[in-house]
């Protein structure tokens, strides 16, 4: 319950929040710095202001991130978490900043450094009253991808399983969030050398996406490509070719926005045809693909 007050403070007392939302970044930076300076001065006389300082640092970090100042944002978020080590800060706030810092590090390709902050955010969200399992489940998906990249497949599997459990409970099976986790889960099993399990996960994701997005959505094409890759690994090459062809048909419908995906899937399709000895069909599609891409 004490989390509500600091959150309301951040919205009502920090004009940088509304300026940031309107894209007025220079003004947002000035406002964020001004309020933080005032709070730094006043907190020496009033310990109850530390949650406000914490939030002010988070808002400053948000502005810096939007201004592409990743180093500045990292410093602001880190300082906020240092404050949380010395003063009582509501877990809802620490979870939020941990998530922001982890995401910043993750997208800066510093995944190993991001992982502990994702873990801490999960712990904080799940420790709230009531627990925010939904936010934790979304973070688990990100964390699982990191552990997959680090070769920690068992840890990645645990996080995907928990993420699916919570997301299906909160959103039902037929949601893009659930489909995305199934897709990522399949990628984990494929990378770990379990194409049968990968097929099961990819199939679940494909089924959901076809139901909620329709048969011709680019995400459906992605799922079909994943299915084709797994089927090829299992030696089901005839079915793999059909999935590639269906994926390419969909991507061609959206060629203006999906040219890169079309080219990547098309190259995989050509490689499979060549591996199967069908040079004529491979050459014919290569020619068609070049013509389609040239038209964009």
Image (tube, rainbow, N blue to C red):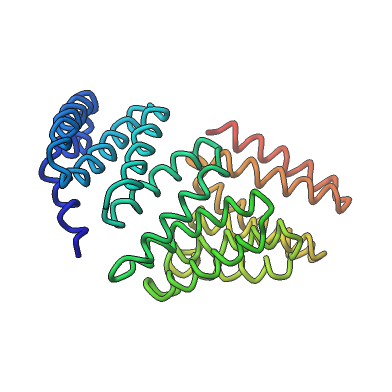
User: Observer-nearest residue: 276 or 203?
Assistant: 203
**Is the residue 126 above or below the residue 95 in the image?**
below
Q: Residue at x 36, y 47 (%)?
A: 85
For the question of whether residue 110 can be seen, the reply is yes
Screen quadrant of the N terminus: bottom left
**Is the residue 236 above or below the residue 145 in the image?**
below
Query: Whole-percent x and y of residue 144?
Result: 56, 57
Query: Whole-percent x and y of residue 116?
Result: 50, 50
Where is residue 56, by image quadrant? Answer: top left
Taking the view exactly as shown, the residue that stands out farthest to the right is: 277
Q: Residue at x 76, y 46 (%)?
A: 270
Is 187 left or right of 175, judged from the image as shown? right
Q: Total marks drawn?
A: 0
Is 33 left or right of 91, judged from the image as shown? left
Q: Residue at x 73, y 40 (%)?
A: 286
User: Observer-nearest residue: 166 or 41?
Assistant: 41
Query: Whole-percent x and y of residue 177?
Result: 44, 62
Is 63 left or right of 36, judged from the image as shown? right
For the question of whether residue 213 can be seen, the reply is no
User: Observer-nearest residue: 276 or 24?
Assistant: 24
Q: Residue at x 22, y 23 (%)?
A: 26
Query: Whole-percent x and y of residue 89?
Result: 27, 52
Taking the view exactly as shown, the residue that stands out farthest to the left is: 12
Taking the view exactly as shown, the residue that stands out farthest to the front is: 45
**Is the residue 160 above or below the residue 296 in the image?**
below
């Amino acid at each position: 319950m004490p989390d509500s007050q600091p959150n309301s403070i951040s919205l009502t007392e920090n004009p940088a929040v509304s300026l940031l939302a309107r894209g007025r970044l220079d003004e947002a930076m000035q406002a964020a710095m001004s309020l933080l300076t005032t709070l730094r001065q006043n907190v020496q006389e009033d310990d109850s202001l530390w949650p406000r300082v914490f939030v002010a640092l988070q808002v400053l970090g948000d502005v810096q991130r939007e201004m592409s100042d990743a180093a500045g944002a990292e410093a602001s978020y880190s300082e906020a978490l240092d404050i949380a080590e010395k003063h009582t800060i509501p877990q809802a706030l620490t979870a939020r900043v941990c998530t922001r810092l982890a995401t910043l590090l993750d997208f800066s390709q510093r995944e190993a450094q991001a992982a502990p902050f994702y873990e801490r955010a999960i712990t904080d969200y799940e420790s709230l009253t009531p627990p925010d399992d939904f936010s934790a489940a979304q973070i688990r998906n990100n964390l699982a991808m990191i552990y997959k990249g680090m070769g920690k497949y068992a840890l990645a599997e645990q996080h995907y399983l928990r993420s699916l459990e919570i997301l299906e409970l909160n959103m039902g099976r037929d949601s893009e969030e659930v489909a995305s986790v199934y897709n990522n889960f399949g990628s984990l099993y494929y990378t770990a050398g379990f194409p049968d399990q990968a097929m099961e996960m990819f199939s679940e994701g494909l089924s959901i996406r076809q139901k909620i997005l329709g048969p011709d959505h680019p995400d459906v094409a992605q799922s079909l490509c994943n299915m084709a890759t797994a089927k090829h690994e299992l030696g089901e090459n005839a079915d793999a070719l059909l999935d590639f062809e269906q994926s390419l048909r969909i991507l061609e419908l959206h060629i203006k926005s999906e040219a890169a995906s079309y080219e990547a899937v098309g190259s995989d399709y050509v490689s499979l045809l060549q591996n199967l000895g069908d040079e004529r069909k491979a050459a014919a599609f290569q020619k068609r693909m070049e013509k389609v891409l040239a038209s964009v």
